[in-house]
């Protein structure tokens, strides 16, 4: 971890101290501070109005926030700002949604599970072929509030024909999908980290039969399994960060290391959430106890923007099209 990364982690820790959880669909109280400090523009060049920094810095931020139980539109906003900068648009006030179907300028749109749409004035859509922009304040555009299982805003957006405009001059859609895979892997890894820290504290401090729960072999073994899941997610994430070449845009395919990190984080998160609740017992399902701030978001994020099965299909396609050498050197290494 670089000195800059360490400073970012410490900054997030300071901001997250005593940060209250927002109501379902609402924004964290630290969100305005993230905007004020320019953290939503990390990874976007200063010459284009951004804060500079790298994709690695952005992954550190994404993980640090979720490890503290804080959910924000950081990932969607930062990626949107990168796209807006590429295309000469003003930064800020935008989110990103990934579509499985291709969109058209000539057709009305009805998009579901759009992240944080009610809090934004522009929406950037990404599918496997194109990137487009919707002005959410345009006439005829309606936003119907919704939430995911973690309580994050996931809204329905309906727009008349002619509202969506295809963007050119930006990175290829595959490259954007790769960035989102990497960043959501970082968010999941942070939530796993938070689950592990909370569970470890629980079994170390709660006593049963006159001794801490951690002294019971079965409990210690299950806690170790969460730690193993965290280490697996971290290893895949570190490898993906190393392979990310942010100076190169227009990749013809999604970065395989980012997809692997995304799949590993999803699987590790499923194990960590299950065991975390088992070791907490009934305490883990109460609203007052913070475990659900991590586990419900793991369950939600592992299927956003694509499910694990979809990412595995993507990985299979990469293996088929890149050949045997790439299979061994890039995917299974």
Image (spheres, rainbow, N blue to C red):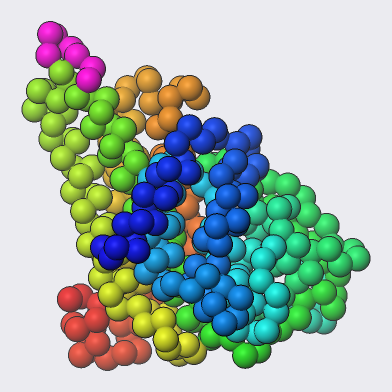
**Residue that sits furthest to the right in the current view:** 139
Up-down relation of residue 81 to residue 215 (above or below): below
Q: Quadrant of the C terminus?
A: bottom left
**324 left or right, relative to 173:** left
**Residue at 31% across, 90% down:** 322
Q: Is residue 303 among what the camera can see?
A: yes
Residue 149 x/y as whole percent = 54, 42
Q: Which residues are magenta?
A: 205-211
Tell me which corner region of the image, top left, top right, bottom left or bottom right, holds residue 84. bottom right
**Residue at 15% across, 18% down:** 212
**159 left or right, relative to 278:** right
**Residue at 35% across, 89% down:** 321
Q: Is residue 265 among what the camera can see?
A: no
Up-down relation of residue 212 to residue 333 (above or below): above
Residue 112 x/y as whole percent = 67, 58
Magenta span contains residue 143: no
Magenta span contains residue 207: yes
**69 left or right, relative to 134:** left
**37 left or right, relative to 315:** right
Residue 201 x/y as whole percent = 25, 28
């Amino acid at each position: 971890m670089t000195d800059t990364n360490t400073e970012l982690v410490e900054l997030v820790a300071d901001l997250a101290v005593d940060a209250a959880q927002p109501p379902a669909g609402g924004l964290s109280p630290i969100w305005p501070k993230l905007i004020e400090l320019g953290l939503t523009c990390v990874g976007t060049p200063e010459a284009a109005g951004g804060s500079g920094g790298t994709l690695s810095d952005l992954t550190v931020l994404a993980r640090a926030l979720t490890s503290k139980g804080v959910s924000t539109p950081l990932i969607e906003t930062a990626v949107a700002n990168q796209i807006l900068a590429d295309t000469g648009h003003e930064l800020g006030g935008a989110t990103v949604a990934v579509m499985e179907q291709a969109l058209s300028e000539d057709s009305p749109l009805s998009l579901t599970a759009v992240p944080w749409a009610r809090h934004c004035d522009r929406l950037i859509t990404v599918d496997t072929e194109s990137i487009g922009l919707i002005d959410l304040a345009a006439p005829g555009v309606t936003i119907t509030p919704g939430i995911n299982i973690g309580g994050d805003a996931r809204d329905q957006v309906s727009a008349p024909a002619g509202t969506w405009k295809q963007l050119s001059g930006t990175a290829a859609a595959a490259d954007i999908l790769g960035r989102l895979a990497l960043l959501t892997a970082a968010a999941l890894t942070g939530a796993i980290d938070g689950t592990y820290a909370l569970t470890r504290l629980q079994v170390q401090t709660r006593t049963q039969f006159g001794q801490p729960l951690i002294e019971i072999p079965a409990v210690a073994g299950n806690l170790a399994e969460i730690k193993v899941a965290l280490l697996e997610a971290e290893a895949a994430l570190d490898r993906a960060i190393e392979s990310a070449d942010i100076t190169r845009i227009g990749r013809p395919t999604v970065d395989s290391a980012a997809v692997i990190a995304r799949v590993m984080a999803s699987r590790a998160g499923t194990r960590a959430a299950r065991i975390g609740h088992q070791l907490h017992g009934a305490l883990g399902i109460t609203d007052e106890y913070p475990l659900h701030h991590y586990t419900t978001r793991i369950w939600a994020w592992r299927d956003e923007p694509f499910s694990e099965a979809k990412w595995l299909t993507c990985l299979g396609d990469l293996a088929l099209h890149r050949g045997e050498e790439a299979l061994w050197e890039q995917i299974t290494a």
